[in-house]
Amino acid sequence: MKHCVTLTLRENVGGNSIDGSGLCLSRIIGKSELEISKLSLDSETEDCIGELFDVAVGSSVSRSMVLRGDLSNFHHLAANHHSGTIEIDGNVGDYLGGAMEGCRAGMSGGRVLVRGNAGKQAGYRMRRGEIFIAQDAGDFLAAHMIAGTICVAGNVAGNVAGNAAGKAANHVGYGMRRGSLLLATQPVLAANRFSGPIPGSGRWIRLIEPVGDQKLDRMLAEMAAGNCVTSRGDAAAGGVGEILWTG
């Protein structure tokens, strides 16, 4: 058995923007509850993890970290993620798995599951790994993505606000170079940046291990059965990334 660390956000945590990049699985795995509690959240603050979260250490079949609570004001979570699983039982802020300022790439492996919503720029400069978002994702999803897989089972970039066409905003995959983006809703893609939509073959999606979320697993099974449409780009960045959506 391997370690599983559960961090439950305390109720008295304010709504100020917080750099969540320090909540790194490789940084805390193998440590005791007391050791994790005393770790600083990041290099620029004196706040310790234990001041913001209740910490519990247990066992699991894989290296994993579970974050519970509304983390909408925590940004850059999983920025340095490279192996194991991070599960966020709630919402998360901007730049999930995205590169930090001054860095050329974001997460480089492993799996991230968000059971709520994700903010803007999820997967920004993501190099490898898998991100699964069970609800909605913000604008500039997969911007400048280098490689990896992102799956969103909800709406993207404003659908909740009632987009008249019922489609995602046109910033999806901006500057995307490679990788795969799987969507439950049809995106609006610039014709000079992405190829025209054609029927897609989602057979390779069968290789993705079950996520453990009913909505996401149902969407993936539907796409793996061939019920999907695909487009490639971003041609303006010389990219050959693949965007697939159910249809």
Image (cartoon, helix red, strand yellow):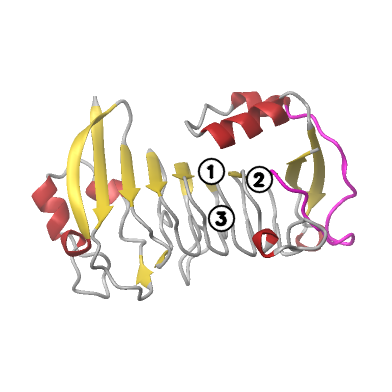
**Secondary structure type for disc 3:** loop
- For the residues marked 2 and 3, what is the alpha-carbon distance in whole angstroms? 10 Å
Q: Name the residue under label 3.
A: 123
Question: Which of the two labelled residues, at mark 1 and mark 3, occupies the earlier sequence position?
Answer: 3
- Does residue 146 appear left or right of residue 103 in this picture? right
Quadrant where the image shows the N terminus: top left
Question: Which of the two labelled residues, at mark 1 and mark 2, occupies the earlier sequence position?
Answer: 1
Type of amino acid under label 3: Gly
Q: Nearer the viewer, mark 1 or mark 2?
A: 1
Q: Looking at the rendered structure, which numbered label has been put on residue 100?
A: none
Q: Residues within 10 Å of mark 1 (few under 14, many from 20)?
A: many
- For the residues marked 1 and 3, what is the alpha-carbon distance in whole angstroms? 10 Å
**Secondary structure type for disc 1:** strand
Specify the segment rendered in magenta.
184-202
CB under 8 Å between callouts 1 and 2?
no
Task: Find residue 162 and report its horizontal and vertical position in percent.
Answer: 72, 63
Q: Mark 2 points at which residue?
A: 179
Residue at 46 percent across and 44 percent down: it is 112
Task: Find residue 173 and report its horizontal and vertical position in percent.
Answer: 70, 57
**Secondary structure type for disc 2:** loop
